[in-house]
Amino acid sequence: MLTPPKTAKRPIERVHHGDVYVDDYEWLRAKDDPEVVAHLHEENAYTNAKTEHLAILQEQLFDEIKARTKETDLSVPTREGDWWYYTRTVEGRQYGIHCRVPVASPDDWEPPVTDDSGAPLPGEQVLLDDNAEAAGHEFYALGSFDVTADGSTMLYGVDVEGDERYTVRLRAVDGTDRAYTDVIEGTAAGAVFDASGRYLFYATVDESWRPDTIWRHEVGTEASDDVSVFHEPDERFWLGVGLTRSRRFLMIEAGSNVTSESWLLDAADPTGEFAVVWPRKDGVEYDVEHVVAGGRDRLLIVHNDDAVNFELVSVAASDPQGPRRMLLPHDPAVRIEGVDAFRDFVSVEYRREGLPRVAIAKVPPQGLPADATPDDTLHELEFDEALFSVGVGGNPSWEQPTLRIGYTSFVTPSTVYDVVVATGERMLRKRQPVLGDYDATRYAQRREWATASDGTRVPISLVYRHDLVTLGEPAPTLLYGYGSYEHSIDPGFGIPRLSLLDRGMIFAVAHVRGGGEMGRLWYEHGKKLEKRNTFTDFIAAARHLIDEDFTAPDRLVAQGGSAGGLLIGAVANLAPKYFSGFLAEVPFVDPLTSILDPSLPLTVIEWDEWGNPLDDEEVYSYMRSYSPLENVHVNHYPRILAVTSLNDTRVLYVEPAKWVARLRDVGADPLLKIEMAAGHGGVSGRYSAWRERAFAYAWVIDAAGAHPSGE
């Protein structure tokens, strides 16, 4: 099928604030209409035909990803209670296998290890085999997984459609033949047991897929008897529920894009009433952790009340709205991002000079002295690479003597360390295996700075093979961008990306405003009525790479997904001359139509990010001025590939479908690939995901003019 599908025009008028917009393709929203489904299949057929010449390269890329990946492997075990928990993967199987082995003794904090074969650990108990659960389903995702504190019962929540609605079930894992009939349908991700294991708490979603109600379920009873313990009527807020690491409190958290609120309940009284920590205040966000200092329950709170980059305070758990003790004051150069509390120490995550950092502070038994300063207690972990990412993760145990962190860079595979807090010793637990001849010294990473139109310096991160790329000679380049929700795109390793680098390509990230790389104001200056900065920053980054001869317009491809797909669509309208191709994945390219419809998933909560065009004419006009779909015009568009999923609830497939049709109206020849059994994250299963990445990267290599065979 070498002729693009003809998309029928059925114009409807959208009228707001006196502005009339004629939408010819809104009829494609009818997901269950056989005509729409047939049209989407035609789009796939056209894309397959137009990319048929890349089939050999796609297969080669898939083989390269597979050959570099250790298919039979296991994660670093994490201790919780009397067990070490881990996940194994097995060659030839799409999904993981969740397992555990018993601890050797109460003082056993040394994770068990196996040989390099990835074989099961001695004494292994398989809790959940995702491969068995996924059998017979085109899509599978695990959204909840928890085990009672005594290790006897497991809950798991599964989505087999891609719409992020999970069915929760229970299973005995203590070796008995107890059978549970509990089935809870239509939950959000993140169901958890209470401290006793008698109850579980979970969230359900409203018609807009917003988690709006928290429920309590008594194990062994019917779901119809479950009790609603909290409902959030404000459509801007999402709910979540969990336990503090100490298991001292149950906690409900509500959050919009700019405001949050938390409630606590003594875990010894799971049927009691939750009490608010700090009443919500518009524009104030805070996170809560429980710590015991000087024998008293305290709450550590990271917040931005009159502290744009956030600060850390301590309050009494019995009187959280009472006096605050300052622990880490606001610093305009440091964005505090989170705190994790343990019995004997706390860790703090923050961002400085565009990179994430982690520091550790011990908690003396008597509590901190009144005159203590952060410099007395807080010790930052140091690393020797100029670009890196570090974060705290895999630390469920309140009493553990170590802090587990993850570390990576563009050239260093994902690495797990345990830091012995008492001594500062850093123990390497695992580094992501990369099979074949991977040698990190063959690759270089560096930071460049572009100058935006308003004079702002915009960081760009690059990685490349220094023996294949000669600086000063333009190389094929993939430039990635996101720039929304204060989400930072930090340096990280990726096995699939090696297939680009080994073909002499540069991979670059433009850290544009709207993200959080440079602090909270970096985000604030890339949202609402300053959203255009996101797009112009990306263009400035492209121009810098071209002006400095890292690449050239006929060798530069742009990539972005979701809100980053909005970035790609806007840049395609504003500055197509700098690019040879645009890869837009699950792209948010019809934002105004979506944000004007409160009945659609996510719309109301998104008003904090984009503004409310329903009520504010200025916001409407501003969004109208950059909406990718509504600003398509006669232009010289380069190659465009849009990838989407039929069951995506976050960015509906109709947005890229309409965008592609509109681009064809002005003479462009875009491609649309629709996964017919997937959600926002794409297909499920690792082999399927590798094939999807191979498809996209084959297209990128072709569009950038890189040599298809590599070395």
Image (cartoon, rainbow, N blue to C red):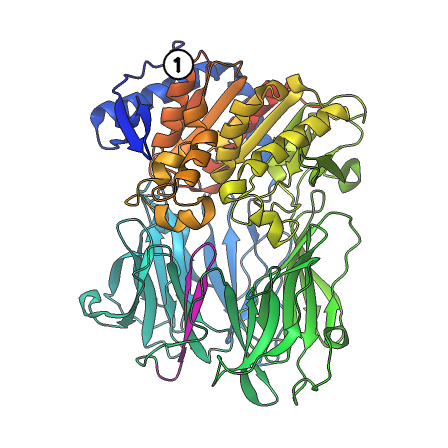
Residue 499, horizontal then vertical, whole percent? 64, 31
At mark 1, the secondary structure is helix
Stretch in magenta: 253-269
Farthest residue toward the top?
3
Residue 711, by quadrant, is top right
Instruction: Identify residue for label 1.
Output: 665
Q: Amino acid at mark 1?
A: Asp
Residue 239, horizontal then vertical, whole percent? 38, 61
Q: Is residue 77 in sight in this rendering?
A: yes
* Rendered residue at 36%/45% (across/down): 603
Residue 230, horizontal then vertical, whole percent? 30, 69
* Rendered residue at 42%/34% (across/down): 621
* Rendered residue at 48%/59% (across/down): 283
Report if residue 460 lies within the magenta region: no
Give the left or right position of residue 683, taking residue 111 as reference: left
Q: Is residue 648 in sight in this rendering?
A: no
**Vertical side of 246 occupied by 258: above or below:** above
